């Protein structure tokens, strides 16, 4: 595993208010990770990079090991990307805060990672001082976005007339009937109850659930419920 500790220590608990925010950096470009660490060095009394990873698998293992306060998360990586890291980490480490840091300012990318559980999204044009401030703010509970990106999130979640529809590529993979089944499943309905509610057979319910599991690459009902909740299907 190439996830690396930057402070020479093993895993430890979350930082306190008195100490710097402990940060884990996830990006598939080693040169960019080096640049981020250099930019944050001037704010070392506020932010400490304790580890880094260049892939989804390394990130999941490294976050579990170092237990950072905040994860700086790239959106696009060859083996999955930021949303995949969120899906695999959040069920077991709900206290870790995620801040997306990406070159992309596409609405679809912003919404996908926020729906997956990130607390904010900033672009790679951000300065080191601004990034350190953003890390501190998400750790304190704020939602942080680069200026033009906040509107994407408002449009996606405000449910107001005239809001621009934001596509979720993963959700778009599901058929309307699969969404109906998933919605009821996430609400705690048994297969028999779902069948009765939708006027279909239990066997058909099982077929739809298997299809949803395959399309979302999840493994059980609990993970499906979290996935549905993150997308406001429940």
Image (cartoon, grey):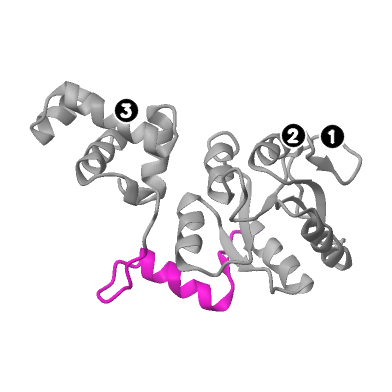
Image vertical order of residue 195 relative to residue 119, above or below: above
Quarter of the figure with the N terminus: top right
For the residues marked 1 and 2, what is the alpha-carbon distance in whole angstroms?
Answer: 7 Å
Q: Pointer 1: residues within 10 angstroms few (<14), some, or many (20+)? A: few
Residue 66 placement: quadrant: top right
For the residues marked 3 and 2, what is the alpha-carbon distance in whole angstroms?
Answer: 32 Å
Q: Pointer 2: residues within 10 angstroms few (<14), some, or many (20+)? A: some
Element marked by disc 2? helix
Where residue 173 sits in the image (x, y, percent)? Answer: 33, 46
Element marked by disc 3? helix
Assess whether mark 2 and mark 1 are in contact (beta carbons under 8 angstroms): yes
Q: Pointer 3: residues within 10 angstroms few (<14), some, or many (20+)? A: some
Residue 133 placement: quadrant: bottom right
The mark found on residue 175 in the picture is: none
Image check: 226 left or right of 159? right
Image check: 54 left or right of 151? right
Q: Nearer the viewer, residue 20 or 117?
A: 117
Q: Is residue 2 magenta?
A: no
* Residue to which mark 3 is pinned: 210
Q: Which residues are magenta?
A: 140-166
Farthest residue toward the front? 78
Element marked by disc 1? loop
Assess whether mark 2 and mark 3 are in contact (beta carbons under 8 angstroms): no
Farthest residue toward the left? 199
Q: Nearer the viewer, residue 44 or 16?
A: 44
* Residue to which mark 2 is pinned: 65
N-terminal of the two: label 3 or label 2? 2
Q: Nearer the viewer, mark 3 or mark 2?
A: 3
């Amino acid at each position: 595993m190439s996830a690396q500790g930057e402070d020479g220590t093993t895993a430890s608990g979350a930082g306190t208010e008195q100490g710097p925010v402990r940060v884990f950096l996830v990006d598939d470009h080693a040169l960019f990770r080096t640049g981020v660490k250099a930019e944050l060095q001037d704010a070392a009394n506020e932010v400490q990079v304790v580890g880094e990873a260049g892939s989804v698998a390394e990130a999941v293992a490294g976050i579990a090991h170092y237990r950072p306060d905040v994860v700086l998360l790239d959106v696009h990586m060859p083996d999955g990307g930021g949303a995949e890291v969120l899906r695999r980490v959040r069920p077991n480490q709900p206290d870790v805060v995620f801040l997306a840091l990406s070159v992309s300012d596409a609405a679809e990318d912003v919404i996908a990672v926020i729906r997956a559980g990130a607390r904010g999204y900033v672009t790679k044009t951000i300065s080191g001082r601004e990034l350190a401030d953003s890390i501190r703010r998400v750790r304190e509970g704020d939602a942080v976005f680069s200026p033009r990106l906040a509107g994407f999130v408002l449009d996606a979640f405000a449910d107001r007339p005239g809001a621009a529809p934001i596509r979720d590529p993963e959700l778009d993979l599901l058929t309307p009937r699969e969404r109906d089944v998933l919605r009821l499943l996430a609400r705690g309905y048994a297969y028999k109850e779902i069948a009765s509610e939708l006027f279909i057979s239990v066997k058909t319910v099982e077929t739809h659930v298997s299809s949803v599991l395959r399309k979302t690459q999840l493994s059980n009902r609990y993970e499906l419920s979290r996935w549905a909740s993150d997308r406001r299907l429940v």
